[in-house]
Image: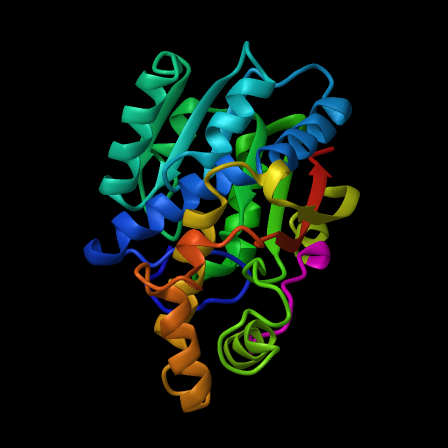
Amino acid sequence: MTTHHDTHGHVGHERAAGPDTALAKLLELDGEVLASYYSELTGLLAGVSDPAPARILDLGSGPGTGSFALARRFPAAHVTAVDISAQMLHRLRKQAFAHGFANRVGTVEANIDEPWSEIGEGGPYDLIWAAAFLHHVADPDRAFARAFEQLRPGGLIAVTELDFFPRYLPEDPGVGRPGLEARLHAATNTRPPHEWTEQLRAAGFVLEERRPFEVLLDRTEAGPSLNAYAQGALAKLRSHATDVLEADDLAALDVLLDETRPHGVAHRDDLRVRTTRTTWIARRP
């Protein structure tokens, strides 16, 4: 939960007050557009959970994308959502009330890098969920060790990482040179993929599965929020690309992000979501 500008692997967890609103909206759109992916992932967890989890911990919950997916999948469970951002948790509580989860999704404002005294009050947990988050903590090994302590014997931890931001545009978006989005990703995705297998084992977990998910959704499958989702994600990448992308590509990207232009992402009907995510599922013996 440290504050920095790592764009690798997810839609960001910067915690300054300014970016929180835009980030929260993007994370909420992620849950809407990729609803089928979240359903598949939580279904996988349901298949390996025995019995079904009653107490779930969502680390780095943001506005609750994972918390609500888990609450839907496990209707008898109580979810404890942990985040360092009061604004994120405020949005989460409003959404929990709106969707009828107010009695089943609670929040804890805490820094994962600090002692887990308040987090531990809801444990021991049956399932711990950490989506696109653990690479942000100062000491992941310590976080895995604490997660191990908070799980009941036989409980599961599910850690997910994104390869990078999704892609949305066709090869030739009709603005600038073809291949703009590929160059944008190459310029801003400069870190190696995250790999948690050995850290999980070192913490005492037994790896059950390492599952890659390839997500490919057309406009019909992604739903009406696709344009806003693509607009938000590309705008976030644009904020990191000023010093690493050629001037003509930056200009083309600005045209695509201009909601008044006919080629703008906000109005296009040729967008698709293409991304890959990897989940590690491990059990406390």
Decide whether residue 127 is among the magenta residues.
no
Comparing 30 with 118, the one in front is 30
> With 117 as the anchor, is 38 left or right in this view?
right
Q: Main secondary structure of the magenta part?
A: loop
The picture places residue 187, in percent across and down from the top left corner, at: 53, 81
Q: Residue furthest front?
A: 262
Q: Residue furthest left?
A: 17
The picture places residue 149, in percent across and down from the top left corner, at: 55, 36
Residue at 34 percent of width and 51 percent of height:
23
- Dividing the picture into quadrants, the one containing residue 264 is bottom left
Q: In this orientation, does residue 147 appear? A: yes
Comparing 247 with 199, the one in front is 247
Decide whether residue 193 is among the magenta residues.
yes
Residue at 35 percent of width and 72 percent of height:
239
The picture places residue 190, in percent across and down from the top left corner, at: 56, 78
> With 94 as the anchor, is 1 left or right in this view?
right
Residue at 70 percent of width and 23 percent of height:
46
Q: How is the image coloured?
A: rainbow
Up-down relation of residue 157 to residue 218 (above or below): above
Q: Which residues are magenta?
A: 189-198
Quarter holding the C terminus is top right
Residue at 20 percent of width and 57 percent of height:
18
Up-down relation of residue 105 to residue 13 (above or below): above
Q: In this orientation, does residue 12 appear? A: no
